[in-house]
Amino acid sequence: MDSIYFKVEVKDKVAQVSFNRPEKANALHMEAWIEMQSIFEKLSQTDEVRAVILAGEGTHFCAGIDLELLMSVGKLQGVACSGKRSEKVRAMVLTLQQTITAIEKCAKPVLAAIHNGCIGGGVDIATACDMRYCTEDAYFTIKEIDLGMVADIGTLQRLPKIISPGMAAEMAYTGRKVFGNEAKDIGLVNHCYSSRDTLMEGVMEIAATIASKSPLSIRGTKDVLHYSREHSVDDSLNYMSTWNAAMLLSDDLKEAFAATMEKRAPKYQD
């Protein structure tokens, strides 16, 4: 998959997507945001990909929005009409929100492998992933508060559904750094590793396990989990019954039963 600001590699049904602006601490300018959306939309439709790992090249996972992009907003002060100026700001925010939502909507589970800095927009991105893993020296900071801003591209919407609302509020109000072990304690990450190498080994192993399962069932599980997060138990159960009515009697189900009877590992088609 051709890309400029990311490295994308697919091996054994797992795609590894890496931020590739290490000279900018993997901060993303508008071109990189647009590219990221395109990458995840393509991976969502790529049958041979069953799981995605999101990581960062260089020193940090992701420093969020490139300051040049933030500074470009100031140029909009030159737009005389306040309504048109606000309209342009809103359009830019929506573009960035949609990019991150493309990660959440990717049909394949996305595992974030986070080392060192996960800053500002990096937290927005991490919260859109299905699972997060980090190193002990990783840190998470909602930096927008120190820039006189309100975090606006997903953190305030997703983080309180991952960790306690009170802890999410503390992070948002203070901008303090939450390091790896604390991130594990508060449920922000699933596991904290001693080094970047062990992080990648561990996340690769989890992704490989996911990739070995029925791809139809994995996609369905992600879909149902997301639906259930936003709906009542009754509504979610009803949705589940409809999903299974359409998808339960699949070739993957037949293969799973056959593999069990024959005492072998199942082999699912992409």
Image (tube, grey):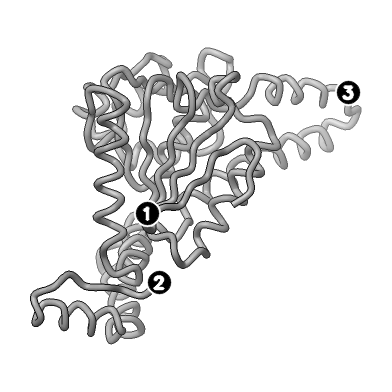
Q: Position of residue 163 (x, y in %)?
A: 28, 35
Q: Residue at x 30, y 73 (%)?
A: 268
How far apart are labels 3 and 2 at the CA level? 52 Å
- Tell me, yes or no, whether the two marked residues, 1 and 3, touch with CB atoms within 8 Å: no
195 relative position to 259: left or right: right
User: Which quadrant is home to the C terminus?
Assistant: bottom left
35 relative position to 9: left or right: right
The residue type indicated by label 1 comes to: Pro
SS category of the residue bearing label 2? loop
Judged by depth in the image, the label closer to the viewer, 1 or 3, is: 1
- Tell me, yes or no, whether the two marked residues, 3 and 2, touch with CB atoms within 8 Å: no
The residue type indicated by label 3 comes to: Gly
Q: Position of residue 242 (x, y in %)?
A: 33, 80
**Would residue 54 be visible to someone looking at this image?**
yes
223 relative position to 86: left or right: left
Q: Residues within 10 Å of mark 1 (few under 14, many from 20)?
A: many
Q: Is residue 260 above or below residue 44?
A: below
Residue named by callout 1? 109
Say which label, 2 or 1, has the lower sequence index: 1
Residue named by callout 3? 78
Q: Residues within 10 Å of mark 3 (few under 14, many from 20)?
A: few
Q: Residue at x 27, y 62 (%)?
A: 212
Say which label, 1 or 3, has the lower sequence index: 3
SS category of the residue bearing label 1? loop
Q: Is residue 159 above or below residue 110?
A: above
Q: Position of residue 188 (x, y in %)?
A: 29, 33
Say which label, 3 or 2, has the lower sequence index: 3
**Would residue 94 be visible to someone looking at this image?**
no
The residue type indicated by label 2 comes to: Asp
Residue named by callout 2? 270
